[in-house]
Image (tube, helix red, strand yellow):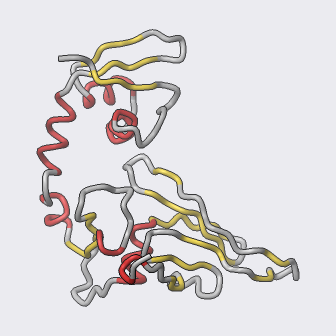
Amino acid sequence: MSKEEREIWKDVEGFEGLYQVSNMGIVRSLDRVDGSGRGWKGRMLSSKLRKNGYREVIICRDGKRKYMLVHRLVAEAFLSNQDNLPQVNHKDEDKGNNRVENLEWCDSKYNNNYGNHIKRVAEAREKPIYVVANSGHRYYFSGVSKAARLLGLHYQNITACLHGRQKTCHGFTFEWAAV
């Protein structure tokens, strides 16, 4: 492992001694004893894919759960935010790549106009798709937006399925239709 690939761990702000985040985008809990005197072994936390395509973890303190976005935890721990910018951009446009070198603080205008975001969203919403129900029936839709609207789903869940980041959404699977 080269020097650039060395994993570095830092405490999660506000959860010092309980949780840490790495420069590779991994979150872990630390060994600790709870208020009842019960010992807990630290472990790597599994992340869940949100509807919008970002990864989140659940961390707890004093019996209260908090849902945290992994890319924000990495940015808060490793990146300076002197201008107090509100958002974190993924430089390679892959929401699953939460390595510190792929993240940067930015404003919403920069984030929404970054790279091919607008073009990709527009193109993806115009490509025809099939929605496959549990029964095996296939339904044709002229695009992701139309399918999302008629099925009452969020379009990003559908695109996550189409791109292999998610297997199903509300019991449906999705396939690109041949043009």
Q: x and y percent of residue 178 in the render?
A: 23, 17
Depth order, front residue of 98/124: 98
Depth order, front residue of 60/42: 42
Q: x and y percent of residue 106 in the render?
A: 21, 73
Which residue is depicted at the point 23% across and 25% down? 143
- Please state if 63 lies on the left or on the right of 116 as rendered: right
Residue 40, above or below 49: below
Which residue is depicted at the point 49% across and 67% down? 68
Dividing the picture into quarters, in which one does residue 127 lie? Answer: top left
- Please state if 141 lies on the left or on the right of 74 as rendered: left
Residue lying furthest front in this view? 1
Residue lying furthest bottom in this view? 82
Dividing the picture into quarters, in which one does residue 73 lie? Answer: bottom left
* Number of residue marks: 0
Looking at the rendered image, the quarter that the N terminus falls into is: bottom left
Residue 47, above or below 87: above
Which residue is depicted at the point 30% across and 55% down? 94
Looking at the rendered image, the quarter that the C terminus falls into is: top left
Q: x and y percent of residue 11 in the render?
A: 54, 85
- Please state if 15 lies on the left or on the right of 162 as rendered: right
Q: x and y percent of residue 43 in the render?
A: 67, 69
Residue 64, above or below 133: below
Dividing the picture into quarters, in which one does residue 176 lie? Answer: top left
- Please state if 70 lies on the left or on the right of 147 as rendered: right
